[in-house]
Amino acid sequence: MGGMAEQCCFLRTNTAEGCVSRLPALCPPEEGWRVLLLKSGRGGAAEAFLSALNDFAEAEGRPAQAFWDAPGRERRCALRLPAQKLCILEAEAPYALEARLPGAGEELLSLDACRDNALLRTRREDLRALNGAWQRELLRAGRFLRAARAMKKDMAFVAGETLDLPKIERCAARFAARRFPPPGGRVGRESRRFLTAVTGQGLLLRRSGLEAAYSRFVVLEDDAGAAAPLLWNLLRSYALGNGLDVVSCPCLLSPHGEPEHLLIPALELCCVTANRRHPIDFEGAQRMQAARFFRKEALQEHRCRLRFCRRTMRELLGEAYQAQAAADILRAQIDEIYAEALLPGAAREAAASFWRTLS
């Protein structure tokens, strides 16, 4: 997945399992990519370094691919240089990355020399207090997200008991037969991204990016969250088997689970899950109701329990968003102190020095 399609997704966000980064998947070392982990880049040092490298690459006619951070911190968090087969990833907390095979797989590059550390030492107590409060708010958001996951799992379990699985399988088979090309002997490749991200204002979806990159939309209304993962996972398997590359986007409450949304860039097809907590609408979208896959009489027997889970989940997510908002404010205050200590032009100079080693 590349180009505009990349800008639809998030590579890092807070989840029910902590802050998860998909950055390492951009350039797997086993495919011959050189991976550079950028350390000590707080206060805008990493952004300045990556921005300068992007400028140098463009000036020499070597296009670079930039990747942007999670919402609230809209700046570069990674840069991919295809000509050099080099990928540079910001590796700062809370999405800290470490080298699995230092030197052979990943290399470390520190921007520590780009700051006046003597000035930072005078603000040590302020930084210690702010950093502790920031970590606590991130953990608090994570606890509420995990509690919301428990409610969602309960809903999916109860509703799952009333699912008509053969009906979902038939729907997936018909969908694939109509929309996917026949198998050609190639197996597609899968990328994993986040289509939504946790912010202080709620879940964020990059709607404008999706509308620019995709022309066909399928919206499945699934309040219980039981049918969507099954349907999209079946379509994922059909697409891969038919040679189509896919982008699987799991729910933030289960970041390593089955897809809640599915993107197929080659077909400009975007399949998303909507519900009352997170309504999604696109002009001209094909809308599907998950109710068609449930035995309605059996589902009605559990309506009180499902209503309780939905209400509780909505309240827990609201608390998570508030904690995330507090964490974002604290992180901005930390970055402000680090920015004051940043030596003018030092990050760009470090980028120029590094670029010369690539030429």
Image: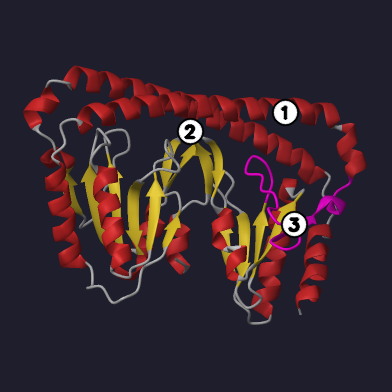
Question: What type is the residue that disc 2 sits on?
Answer: Ala
Say which label, 2 or 1, has the lower sequence index: 2
Q: CA distance from mark 2 to mark 3?
A: 29 Å
Front in this rendered view, residue 204 or 221: 221
- Which residue in the protein does label 3 denote? 102
Q: Nearer the viewer, residue 7 or 20?
A: 20
Q: Is residue 213 left or right of residue 183?
A: right
Residue 211 sits in which quadrant? bottom left
Classify mark 1: helix, strand or loop: helix
Question: Where does the image place residue 289, in percent across and percent down from the top left?
Answer: 16, 43
Q: Residues within 10 Å of mark 3 (few under 14, many from 20)?
A: few
Foreground mark, 2 or 1?
A: 2
Q: Which residue is mark 2?
A: 16
Per the rendering, the mark at residue 130 is 1
Q: Nearer the viewer, residue 278 or 161?
A: 161
How far is disc 3 from disc 1 in space, using C-alphas?
31 Å
- Secondary structure at numbered mark 3: loop
Magenta-tinted stretch? 91-116
Is residue 98 something that shows in the picture? yes
* Depth order, front residue of 291/203: 291
Residue drawn at (23%, 41%) of the image: 227
Judged from the image, the secondary structure of the residue bearing numbered disc 2 is loop
The percent position of residue 320, horizontal first and vertical second, equals 48, 27
Magenta residues, dominant SS class? loop
Query: Label 1: how many residues lie within 10 Å, few (<14), some (14-19) or many (20+)?
Result: some
User: Left of 327 or right of it: where is 272?
Assistant: left
Q: Where 281 sits versus 133, above or below?
A: below
Task: Give the residue type at disc 3.
Answer: Pro
Amino acid at circle 1? Leu
Residue displayed at 48% across by 33% down: 16
